[in-house]
Image (spheres, helix red, strand yellow):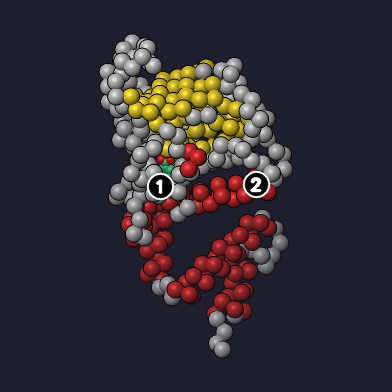
């Protein structure tokens, strides 16, 4: 049996040296991670007989991913953001935590510090021609007790799948608000029905997905961070039922419990919305009711607040 080059002393020495594991100082955890990642890379090169030309093509794709700020697309597209959700789900289950609204990925399009209001808000700035969406619900704990003063931080795409700030054609803060729940833990907002997001068709993430025989589309969705003192922050989304990509999200974020029924009203003069004409509704509109359940904070579990470099409005 021939010895794989991976098991020879030159390769082993190289891995120890390049990761710094052969010497003192530095960050031990990082050294071990680098050793593992590079050694897995060596194994991949060996097993698939990766050529230098293929390797440098991959490096130039990654360079482009960075230049075009697409790592936030690549990671969910490769299922890595969803994998983190699966891990924390399992950790919570092991700790006996259950009953909360399921989490799902944050995605790369959040903007911190959206305008805040009490109880209700209008998210759109009136420039969208889309179908009006009313959404409302209650934030409760796992005992069913309402959580007043919780922050419902909500953001979503416009009718073309674009997000304000990242899409410079939209006004600042369009379709982004923070709503503080009222004394009964309730929130409600008016907005427009979003369209699904699609990866830039000329970018490196879409190029990779195409090579994998995949698309880069997401179903229409609305994002939320729900937070309140003493509770684990919930990062989640609801999907718009009926979307073509509902169960075929390139970012793997759809969860069955996050597809609330959507009520479509063909007639805006429906008495259920008595002030419809006052609100200028003269077309079909939609309604979603969705309650959020928060789990209590558990000190021994990893924090659900994921610190990452969020974009900041100037
Ligand atoms: C989004 O939430 O729209 C999104 C999530 C992952 C990748 C790209 C977009
Ligand atoms: Fe999104």
**Residue 199 vs residue 135, the one in the foreground:** 135
Residue 15 horizontal side relative to residue 57, left or right:
right
Task: Please state the horizontal and vertical placement of residue 303, each as a whole percent of the image.
Answer: 64, 40
For this orientation, the residue located farthest to the front is 271
Task: Please state the horizontal and vertical placement of residue 217, each as a whole percent of the image.
Answer: 35, 46
**Residue 176 vs residue 52, the one in the foreground:** 176
Residue depicted at 36% across the width and 14% down the height: 271
Q: Which quarter of the rendering shows the C terminus?
A: top left
In this rendering, the count of numbered labels is 2
Residue where numbered disc 1 is placed: 247
Residue 53 horizontal side relative to residue 45, left or right:
left
Residue 128 horizontal side relative to residue 46, left or right:
left
Q: Quadrant of ligand 1?
A: top left
Helix, strand or loop under label 1: loop
Residue depicted at 40% across the width and 62% down the height: 58
Regarding residue 82, the answer to whether it shows in the image is yes
Q: Which quarter of the rendering shows the N terminus?
A: bottom right
Residue depicted at 65% across the width and 46% down the height: 93
Question: What is the quadrant of residue 39 in the picture?
Answer: bottom right
Question: What is the quadrant of residue 108 in the picture?
Answer: top left
CA–CA distance in space, label 1 to label 2: 24 Å
Task: Please state the horizontal and vertical placement of residue 222, each as a whole percent of the image.
Answer: 43, 34
Task: Please state the horizontal and vertical placement of residue 280, each as a whole percent of the image.
Answer: 30, 15
Residue where numbered disc 2 is placed: 93
Q: Residues within 10 Å of mark 1 (few under 14, many from 20)?
A: some
């Amino acid at each position: 049996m021939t010895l794989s080059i991976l098991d020879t002393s030159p390769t082993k020495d190289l891995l120890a040296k390049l990761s710094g594991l052969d010497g003192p100082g530095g960050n031990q955890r990082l050294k071990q991670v680098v050793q593992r990642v590079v050694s897995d890379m060596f194994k991949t090169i060996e097993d698939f007989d990766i050529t230098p030309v293929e390797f440098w093509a991959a490096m130039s794709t990654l360079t482009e991913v960075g230049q075009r700020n697409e790592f936030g697309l690549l990671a969910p597209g490769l299922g890595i953001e969803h994998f983190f959700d699966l891990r924390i789900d399992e950790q919570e289950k092991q700790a006996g935590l259950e009953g909360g609204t399921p989490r799902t990925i944050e995605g790369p399009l959040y903007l911190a510090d959206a305008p805040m209001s009490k109880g209700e808000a209008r998210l759109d700035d009136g420039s969208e021609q889309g179908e009006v969406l009313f959404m409302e619900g209650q934030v409760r704990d796992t005992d069913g007790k309402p959580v007043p003063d919780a922050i419902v931080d909500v953001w979503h795409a416009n009718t073309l799948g674009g997000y304000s700030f990242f899409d410079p054609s939209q006004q600042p803060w369009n379709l982004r608000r923070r709503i503080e729940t009222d004394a009964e833990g309730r929130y409600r907002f008016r907005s427009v029905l979003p369209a699904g997001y699609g990866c830039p068709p000329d970018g490196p993430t879409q190029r990779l997905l195409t090579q994998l025989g995949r698309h880069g589309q997401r179903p229409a969705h609305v994002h939320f961070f729900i937070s309140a003192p003493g509770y684990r922050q919930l990062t989640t989304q609801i999907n718009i039922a009926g979307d073509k990509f509902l169960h075929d999200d390139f970012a793997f974020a759809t969860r069955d419990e996050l597809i609330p029924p959507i009520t479509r009203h063909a007639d805006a003069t429906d008495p259920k919305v008595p002030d419809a004409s006052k609100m200028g509704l003269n077309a079909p509109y939609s309604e979603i009711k969705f309650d959020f359940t928060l789990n209590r904070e558990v000190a021994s579990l990893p924090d659900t607040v994921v610190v990452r470099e969020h974009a900041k409005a100037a």
